[in-house]
Amino acid sequence: AGPHGAGFANAIFAPPGCALIELFGAEVRNSIRDEIAPAGGLRYARVLGAPAGDDGFEIRADPNAVRAAVEETLAVPR
């Protein structure tokens, strides 16, 4: 799990069935869900966060939404 960004470039090396959770703010227009996750056979969930700082890079995610995303991705059979 992690914030939307270049760090997810390593997802292309993840084995099929790997669980991947993306956290991002409302301003994000594209997602790894659109291309990388389906191409790699990754189990994917996303959590929409709210701005948490003045720089536009920090987001605050609801812990319950993160927990639900983790449970969702881990519940999918491999």
Image: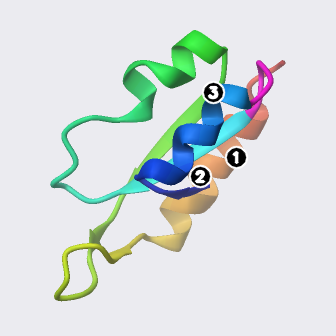
Asked if the residues shown at circle 2 and circle 3 are in contact, with their CB atoms under 8 angstroms apart, the answer is no
Q: At label 3, which amino acid type do we have?
A: Ile
Asked if the residues shown at circle 1 and circle 2 are in contact, with their CB atoms under 8 angstroms apart, the answer is yes
Query: Does the magenta-highlighted stretch encompass residue 17?
Result: yes
Asked whether, in this view, residue 28 is left or right of residue 2, the answer is left
The residue identified by callout 3 is 12
Q: Which mark's residue is nearer the viewer, 3 or 1?
A: 3
Q: At label 2, which amino acid type do we have?
A: Ala
**Relative image position of residue 56 (x, y in whole percent):** 19, 75
- What secondary structure is found at the residue carrying circle 1? helix
The residue identified by callout 1 is 71
Range of residues picked out in magenta: 14-18
**If the image is split into quadrants, where does the C terminus sit?**
top right
Asked whether, in this view, residue 16 is left or right of residue 73, the answer is right
The residue identified by callout 2 is 68
Residue for point 77% across, 22% down: 17
- What secondary structure is found at the residue carrying circle 3? helix
| Residue 14, label in figure | none
Which quadrant of the view contains residue 16? top right
Q: Is residue 75 above or below residue 37?
A: below
Sooner in the amino-acid sequence: mark 3 or mark 1: 3
Which quadrant of the view contains residue 75? top right
Q: Is residue 53 above or below residue 48?
A: below
Query: Does the magenta-highlighted stretch encompass residue 48?
Result: no
Q: Nearer the viewer, residue 58 or 7?
A: 7
